[in-house]
Image: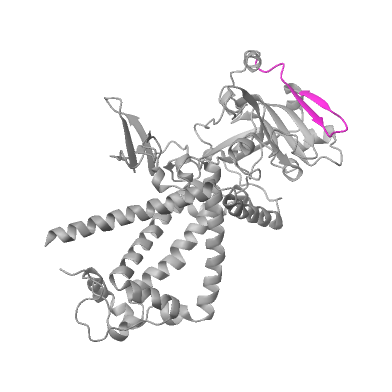
């Protein structure tokens, strides 16, 4: 009596395993096709349109000092091994200069000292990584709008590109690496909480978190918050930047340029 | 796939409060340098080698991923692709769910067929016993949802699905900013992430039980009735419909 039952169970189990393997393999084939991901991407387009429609001016939630993470996780590069950068570390970034150029009427260079003399903003915000984790930190820095006011972007400027001192693998099979880059639009650039931060939790920005300067663009995922910023470039289009998608991860791994989702 | 990028779930506003995770999946090397997969639930560690933490991928290679490749879309590590799938089907769920809610309320499907009647509430103990015995209603009664079925449907429609959608929204940094602080209803973004995940598995559980019940109570009859509205009543049959023989 038990044998037919057992073999039937075996057949059922094999059928179930076969069915799921077939389903998941099918999904993989769709995922690797050229047309299906474009259909999937309509979800992202829809989200982005809804966000735009409702408005992008709202402020990110701010927290109290009690919420600050005991350890603020550093992700991506946590200690750029570039010789030039390391000599800046030894000099405590006294020689660091932030360049603002591109489509601006007044290209400028600002030392760390000069940046710190400008109006500052402090905010306790939550950093949300695309991977899923969150950490809360207190950031102090210059609102990007202040820096842009000095440089005076021309009417053709539509994006702000951040060029960084840390490098990532170029992605093609060579051993070469390329500097990190990211970009945001003017809406985000002039948002009150978008700052170039030089302090974390009341102390100079640690190397792991992007010393001496990193972007805080609250309301977007972590990879938009460029670290080790050397140059801020204003451009009309993202076409000439990297491979045209506006950022290192966007170009290499297919991350979305708009990271408010 | 998305979960594999950060295979741990926390409670509260953030992930690094210093408190232990609700659930985390990981791996470490054993004495003979073999990889051991572990799942830690509220501080209790379980060895899950072969399934969680350490598993064999489709090429036979041992890989240290939280969920095995046969359970993720896509099967390889691609956070970008995983998110594309996720948000596309999330929109399908939200749009379909909205239309469905509109339909059930306007067609009275909700009040007439889904909401338990007074008799239903009284029948709960009997219904539980019937389900345990895999005994299914015959005759006229088979035309209506039974009370456990109604409660299961209602809790999926009005509890699980709304929670999973809201908890999903609670993870979007932009949606957070719309009305600063609303995410606190979940206890913070990481609590929302944890609930999103557990509720997802509850829905998977519901789907499995649902499909199981359909199969054992006459799969073709049910499929036909879903499409055409005709449900054949087997009136004088004394054996349990669809149940496997001895």
In the rendered view, tell whether residue A4 sits above or below residue B68.
below
A96 or A53: which is nearer to us? A53
Residue range of the region highlighted in magenta in the rendering? A92-110
Q: Is A92 positioned to the left or the right of B191 in the image? A: right
Q: Is B89 positioned to the left or the right of A99 in the image? A: left
B80 or A23: which is nearer to us? A23
A180 or B183: which is nearer to us? A180
The answer to whether any part of residue B179 appears in the image is no
A235 or A127: which is nearer to us? A235
The quadrant of the rendering that contains the C terminus of chain B is bottom left
Question: Image point 56% across, 55% down: which residue?
Answer: B88
Residue A107 in the magenta stretch? The answer is: yes
Residue A128, image x, y percentages? 56, 41
Question: Image point 50% across, 54% down: which residue?
Answer: B167
State which quadrant residue A3 falls in.
Answer: bottom left
Question: Image point 53% across, 37% down: which residue?
Answer: A68
Question: Image point 47% across, 62% down: which residue?
Answer: B161
The answer to whether any part of residue B204 appears in the image is yes
State which quadrant residue B149 falls in.
Answer: bottom left
Q: Is B136 positioned to the left or the right of B87 in the image? A: left
Residue A66, image x, y percentages? 52, 39
Residue B241, image x, y percentages? 25, 76
Colour theme? one colour
Residue A150 in the magenta stretch? The answer is: no
Q: Is B26 positioned to the left or the right of A226 in the image? A: left
User: In this figure, what is the number of numbered marks?
Assistant: 0
In the rendered view, tell whether residue B225 sits above or below residue B160.
below
Residue B46, image x, y percentages? 29, 40
List the single residue furthest toward the left. A1
């Amino acid at each position: 009596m038990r044998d037919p039952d057992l073999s039937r169970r075996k057949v059922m189990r094999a059928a179930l395993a076969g069915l799921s393997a077939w389903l998941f393999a099918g999904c993989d084939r769709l995922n690797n096709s050229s047309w299906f991901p474009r259909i999937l991407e309509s979800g992202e387009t829809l989200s982005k349109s809804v966000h735009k429609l409702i408005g992008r001016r709202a402020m990110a939630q701010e927290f109290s000092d009690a919420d600050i993470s005991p350890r603020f996780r550093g992700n991506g590069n946590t200690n750029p091994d570039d010789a030039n950068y390391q000599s800046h570390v030894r000099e405590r970034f006294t020689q660091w200069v932030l360049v603002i150029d591109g489509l601006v009427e007044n290209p400028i260079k600002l030392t760390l000292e000069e940046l710190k003399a400008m109006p500052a903003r402090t905010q306790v915000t939550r950093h949300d990584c695309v991977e899923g984790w969150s950490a809360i930190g207190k950031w102090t820095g210059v609102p990007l709008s202040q820096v842009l006011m000095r440089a005076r972007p021309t009417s053709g400027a539509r994006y702000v590109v951040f060029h960084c001192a840390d490098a990532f693998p170029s992605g093609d099979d060579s051993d070469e690496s390329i500097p990190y880059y990211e970009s945001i639009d003017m809406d985000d650039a002039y948002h009150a909480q978008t700052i170039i931060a030089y302090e974390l939790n009341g102390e100079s920005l640690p190397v792991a978190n992007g010393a001496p300067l990193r972007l805080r663009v609250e309301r977007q995922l972590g990879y938009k918050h460029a670290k080790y910023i050397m140059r801020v470039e204003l451009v009309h289009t993202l076409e000439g930047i990297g491979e045209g998608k506006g950022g290192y991860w966007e170009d290499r791994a297919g991350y979305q340029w708009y990271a408010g989702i | 796939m998305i979960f594999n990028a950060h295979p741990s779930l926390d409670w509260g506003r953030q992930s690094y409060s210093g408190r232990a995770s609700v659930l985390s999946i990981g791996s470490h090397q054993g004495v003979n340098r073999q990889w051991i997969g572990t799942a830690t639930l509220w501080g209790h560690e379980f060895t899950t080698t072969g399934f969680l933490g350490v598993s064999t991928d489709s090429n036979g290679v041992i890989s240290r991923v939280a969920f095995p490749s046969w359970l993720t879309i896509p099967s390889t590590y691609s956070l970008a692709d995983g998110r594309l799938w996720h948000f596309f089907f999330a929109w399908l769920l939200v749009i379909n769910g909205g239309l469905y809610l509109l339909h059930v309320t306007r067609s009275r499907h909700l009040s007439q067929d889904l909401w338990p009647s007074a008799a239903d509430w009284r029948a709960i103990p009997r219904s539980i016993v019937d389900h345990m015995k895999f005994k299914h209603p015959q005759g006229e009664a088979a035309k209506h949802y039974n009370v456990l079925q109604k409660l299961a449907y209602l809790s999926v429609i009005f509890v699980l699905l709304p929670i999973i959608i809201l908890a999903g929204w609670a993870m979007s940094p932009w949606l957070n900013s719309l009305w600063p602080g609303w995410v606190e209803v979940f206890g913070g973004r990481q609590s929302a992430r944890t609930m999103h995940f557990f509720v997802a598995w509850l829905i998977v559980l519901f789907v499995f039980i649902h499909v199981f019940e359909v199969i054992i109570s006459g799969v073709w009859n049910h499929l036909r009735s879903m499409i055409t509205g005709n449900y054949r009543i087997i009136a004088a049959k004394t054996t349990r419909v669809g149940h496997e023989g001895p």
